[in-house]
Amino acid sequence: VSTEIASIDPRTGAVVEVLAPPAASVAEICEAAQAAVGPLEALGRTGRAALLDALAAALDDARSRIVAVADRETGLGETRLNGELTRTCYQLRLFASVLADGGYLEATVDHAGDTAMGPRPDLRRMLVPIGPVAVFGASNFPLAFSVPGGDTASAIAAGCPVVLKAHPSHPATSQLCFDILSTAAGKAGAPEGTFGIVYGQQAGADLVAHPAIRAVGFTGSQGGARALLEIIERRPDPIPFFGELSSLNPIVVTPAAAADRAARIGADFAVSFTLGAGQFCTKPGLAFVPAGPDGDALVAAAQSAVAEAEPMVMLNEGIAASYTRGTAALGRVLATSSTGSGAAAGGFRGTPTLLTATAADLPREATEECFGPVAVIARYTDETELFTALGKLPNSLTATVQRGPGETELPAELSRRLRPIAGRIVFDGYPTGVAVSWAQHHGGPWPATNTQHTSVGATAIRRFLRPVTWQGAPAELLPAELRDDYTGIPRRVDGRLQTGS
Amino acid sequence: VSTEIASIDPRTGAVVEVLAPPAASVAEICEAAQAAVGPLEALGRTGRAALLDALAAALDDARSRIVAVADRETGLGETRLNGELTRTCYQLRLFASVLADGGYLEATVDHAGDTAMGPRPDLRRMLVPIGPVAVFGASNFPLAFSVPGGDTASAIAAGCPVVLKAHPSHPATSQLCFDILSTAAGKAGAPEGTFGIVYGQQAGADLVAHPAIRAVGFTGSQGGARALLEIIERRPDPIPFFGELSSLNPIVVTPAAAADRAARIGADFAVSFTLGAGQFCTKPGLAFVPAGPDGDALVAAAQSAVAEAEPMVMLNEGIAASYTRGTAALGRVLATSSTGSGAAAGGFRGTPTLLTATAADLPREATEECFGPVAVIARYTDETELFTALGKLPNSLTATVQRGPGETELPAELSRRLRPIAGRIVFDGYPTGVAVSWAQHHGGPWPATNTQHTSVGATAIRRFLRPVTWQGAPAELLPAELRDDYTGIPRRVDGRLQTGS
């Protein structure tokens, strides 16, 4: 096992930096995280809100350095990476307001009393931090689902120390962000061990197996998730694993939508599936488009947009190779409609590709995620054909309906059929671009995720909390939020929700 | 594989009835559950609240028949079984009020607008039913964690059809309750397939593997849970498993508590650990008691209570045999302090047993759950000894502190040390008796459960729901609860919690 951590420029394939591995062992790092549990919780909601704001400010302050290193390592471009960092700072600050609100604690007070079941003791429930969390960085979001990002922000907000597993696609970005976060956390009064970082596959496996780790946040492949789940099942105490894995993200264009704006949908679809070189978990991989002239116009618009696109830099050699294999496999069973222009100029690149199929004869390959700038348009002649094809789709993070102006009948039926297989239903938009907000849900049944929780938005914090109920506790032994005189947060008291003052 | 389903009287060991297996296959039953998904959700919160009330009324109406059959099959006695049925009816009615309240939907509305991240689309989130749920009946709660019970009540409340796996300890009770629930459900307008039932280990395995099943509720052993988790991991789409498994439920008696009421604690402890023949998941299996005269008095009181107890009827032959093995293993490493009196009079019986140990030299066996009327008292000489021993305990559903009048310092320290290993912290009471309420939490880290959710109380419904977000949806395609003009339930709108009218 090499201890070298190589930073590679995907535009050239050259190693541009070799990092020294951390001096501490995985066990030492996990023990430091364990030691930070009490002090991090003791900061309280106010202290941790200040910590989150300080982390956001520190990342903002180092913006140009972070973006430059990340761009060199990922090839994602400065515009995208600036947007990603903005997103992460926004998410950190959103969690500061989630802490200030306090509703996430689900504080509940049932005073002692008589019930139809007999006398009930005084019971008070709220959520507490679950303990140290392992966060696995994703290849495709060096700044939003990696060392900084939604998992880290929600775990710290919950009061859980975080041990990061750096993704091998961007070790220098990971190390830089880790240093910035650690320094800022120390200045904000967070305990040592609030952040830890490990590198390499073996360290990741050791991390998930370590007794101090109480939950895992993961964004990656189904294969990677299955491997980690096996390690978890072998633990004497299996722990929660929150994996965001794989997603096809189907789009359905109704006949009325195609009649209304075929060219625009075709062009926008091409933008959506090639954005970030198609390396988004929400990339739309399959679009159902009506047969006939309107659908033809839509396809033509998508074709010409794709034909103008040059080969795109991909995150690493493995992803580029897997993309080449995947598009070749699709090409063997489907008609290739359009491919990007120009020769690949070194490094790891993928040629944008659009393929076509019929809904009536949709091969299995077209219903599987292929990571990268490729999509399939499946033409349908009627609703029966469309609905039958929808019945063959895997579960996804998202499903999208493009409808005609004011159209509701077919969209309602599509909504009914798509809800069981998706975590977010998008109307007249595109699934890429996952807004961070209170109402966001970024999840879905397997293989989209393996959890009923989200990894984006305010409720992502629920993953890293567990309920505790105090029975018959004297006031002075209760957390402040559960005492009778506390009014600062939403609480349910004797069955009635109170908003707090 | 025998298709016979035998109802055995544990007081005699005799087979008293042989039931016919269901005519339908597991697959047919699961498909019927799948077909019920849409119609059950379509009943709406009001319709399902009425359904829950109707189920409670039907169980209440058949109370004497149910209790008689259950008593013959379990030997738990009419008082206990009446209480258990009352509890289940109460839980069904509590969920009717949870539905009326509507806060469980976590309805959240974020209107479109500008943010620091750029423009945000309209996003609206709420929880929806997860789909058909498999519920595994528990041996020890024929009426509260089996065909009727918390899992069934919370799944139906959520809008999920339930396929029950009857526990082999009480097939006749299971069949009777199933018939009552099915008939009442039909009369209340619920679709066919709302309830299904299967018998036998192979049927249970087939049930968990069936594609229509979207979640599993389980109360049973660690071994049983591991076996079902393996089946789930082999599914192409692993599903959530909510298991309540094993719990030691430690009690700590402070020196001040022992000084205040040694005899009462000793006697109450003996009642708690022998209640229901010690066949509770919340049975206190280990109590830490101070060395010295006060502690001696406590032990003496427990000893004499145990010495007066006769051998107790246990649920089935396997549990009785396992109990005999478990107490023998404890007896090999610990001093037996007291055992019940009188000879076992046929059937499956266990002799109440109290053993003593020292906290300084606590063997592993004393920290493992032994199902049945047995407990260990471990004596400690000082806080260091006590805290060291607490550090060796497994996670539990509960942890209990008996403190002196007004005592806070040591209880606070104990609370801090016990919270990480328990889901409920009980002060000056006993863990047996799990009240059904909004603030109850019946859970805890592995091996207590494998989930961050509860199986008792209002929030048990969260297990059988998953979030969906609608993006840019026209009002007429949204669920009523997410439309702008809806005010009947608590909602978070643009970040602000509203209690609803």
Image (cartoon, coloured by chain):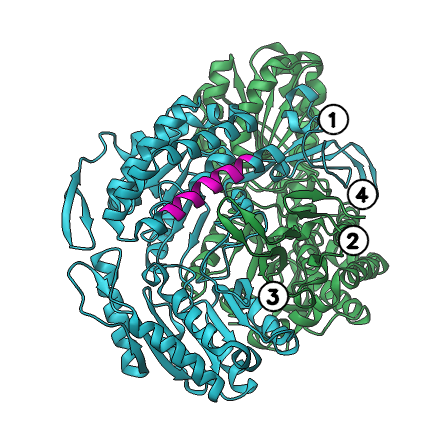
Chain colours: A green, B cyan
Examine the rendered structure and indicate whether residue A485 appears above or below residue A405: below
Q: In terms of secondary structure, what is the magenta stretch mainly? A: helix
Confirm whether circles 4 and 1 share one chain: yes
Start-end of magenta stretch: B82-96
Confirm whether circles 1 and 2 share one chain: no
Chain bearing tag 3 is: A
Q: Secondary structure at mark 2?
A: helix
Say whether residue B92 is magenta.
Answer: yes
Q: Where's residue B473, x and y in %?
A: 68, 25
Q: Are marks 1 and 2 in contact (CB under 8 Å)?
A: no
Kind of residue sitting beneath label 2: Ala
Distance in Å between CA atoms under marks 1 and 2? 26 Å
- Foreground residue among B390 and A52: B390
Q: Secondary structure at mark 4?
A: loop
Does residue B385 appear anywhere in the picture? yes
Kind of residue sitting beneath label 3: Pro
Kind of residue sitting beneath label 4: Met
Q: Residue furthest right?
A: A61
Q: Residues within 10 Å of mark 2 (few under 14, many from 20)?
A: some
